[in-house]
Image: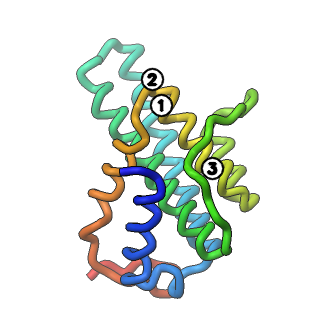
Amino acid sequence: MRFRELQDRLDGWCLERNVYQGSTEKDQVMGGLVEIAEASDASVEMMAAALEDKTENIKSLVTDIMLEVADVMVFTINAAKIAGYHLEPPQPSNGGSEGVFTRMAKGLKKGRYQDVINAAGDIFFDMKVDPAYAYDLVWDKIKDRKGKMQNGIFVKL
């Protein structure tokens, strides 16, 4: 799946579940920040496994990181949609000396949603993972979720 297809599918999913009407841009940003923390945790676990030479764990940890980063993208896409911003597919960025998770968090907090998407793309590139793989992972994770957004909280049915 490509970025635009993820956006289109997510848009339909969100409309069916009242995400745009039942939450705010801030709610989506907060959800994205939680996912950044989870991605960072998975990244630390992967580094520890590499240092301990536990190669059998690394592949599943890479998948965990990709899934969390894709989740960040979902919240970012939602926040941008609510705020009326148009997003482009990830483009390589020159993130400078800041860590990628810091760039993502700053981008979310400051409403620079394209920066978040680009930082996610940098992660995919650095880990030599096709972004389509991560988009497929996150879509498979959420597509069958039942529930509705109410007052900024997704209430599962």
Bin the neighbour count of mark 2 within 10 Å (Cα to Cα): few under 14, some 14-19, many 20 and up.
some
The residue under label 2 is: 47
Question: Above or below — where is 128 with respect to 35?
Answer: above
Q: Is residue 135 above or below residue 6?
A: above
SS for dot 3: helix
**Residue 109 vs residue 101: left or right?**
right
Q: Residue at x 58, y 56 (%)?
A: 33
**On the rendered image, what quadrant is the C terminus found in?**
bottom left
Looking at the image, is mark 2 or mark 3 earlier in the sequence?
2
Q: Camera-side residue: 155 or 13?
A: 13
Residue 116 is marked as: 3
- Residue located beneath label 1 in the image: 44
Q: Decide which of tag 3 and tag 1 comes sooner along the chain.
A: 1
Amino acid type, mark 3: Val
Nearer to us: label 3 or label 1? 3
Image spot of residue 3 (x, y percent): 47, 53
Q: CA distance from mark 3 to mark 1?
A: 20 Å
Q: Neighbour class for label 1 at 10 Å: few (<14), some, many (≥20)?
A: some
Secondary structure found at label 2: helix
